[in-house]
Image (cartoon, grey):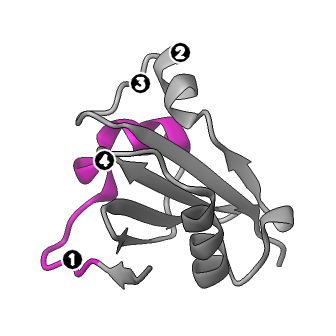
Amino acid sequence: MKLVETPLRSNLDLGTQYPNVTGYLSSKKPIKYYKIYSLDRTQVIYADVFDKINIVLINSKKKISKQEIDYVIKRLLDTTREEVTIHLDMKEKMEKKGFTPSKPVKDLILIQKEVTE
């Protein structure tokens, strides 16, 4: 597995690229910092929203494996699975609240870590 940062060649807003995902996550809260990565065919969004760090894994072709989740946690957060909150049912939660992904999605997972200053 290889985690590769996706270069942003213009001033893109995360809400423009992933409008429904960011709308569901941030609920109008400002995002301090974000980066977009690729892990094979999985898109990884790293977003720091001041009080916590959200990592969203999106794959349109297959289910995301436990190994991929653990790899992202280790590489981006430098921590273990026990120290973060993982929402495996993110897609269903979004659809219940009326947010549907703008593109077809097979699996959508949210990883959250509380930020302590």
Can you identify the residue that label 2 sits on? 96
Q: Is residue 50 above or below residue 76?
A: above
How far apart in space, not on screen, are marks 3 and 2 (Cα)? 7 Å
How far apart in space, not on screen, are marks 1 and 4 (Cα)? 14 Å
Residue toward you, 75 or 50? 75
Q: Residue furthest left?
A: 10
Residue at coordinates 84% horizontally, 73% vertically from top-left? Answer: 116
- For the residues bearing labels 3 and 1, Cβ distance under 8 angstroms: no
Q: Position of residue 21 (x, y in %)?
A: 41, 41
- For the residues bearing labels 4 and 3, Cβ distance under 8 angstroms: no
The amino acid sitting under disc 3 is Phe
Which numbered disc flags the more N-terminal residue, 4 or 2? 4
Query: Is residue 102 in view?
Result: yes
Which numbered disc flags the more N-terminal residue, 3 or 1? 1
Q: Is residue 28 above or below residue 70?
A: above
- For the residues bearing labels 1 and 4, Cβ distance under 8 angstroms: no
- For residue 99, the mark is 3
Badge 3, how many Cα within 10 Å: few under 14, some, many 20+?
some
Residue toward you, 64 or 17? 64
Which numbered disc flags the more N-terminal residue, 1 or 2? 1
How far apart in space, not on screen, are marks 3 and 1 (Cα)? 25 Å
Can you identify the residue that label 1 sits on? 8
Residue at coordinates 83% horizontally, 78% vertically from top-left? Answer: 117
Range of residues picked out in magenta: 6-28
Can you identify the residue that label 4 sits on? 18
The amino acid sitting under disc 1 is Leu
Q: Secondary structure at mark 2?
A: helix
Q: Secondary structure at mark 3?
A: loop
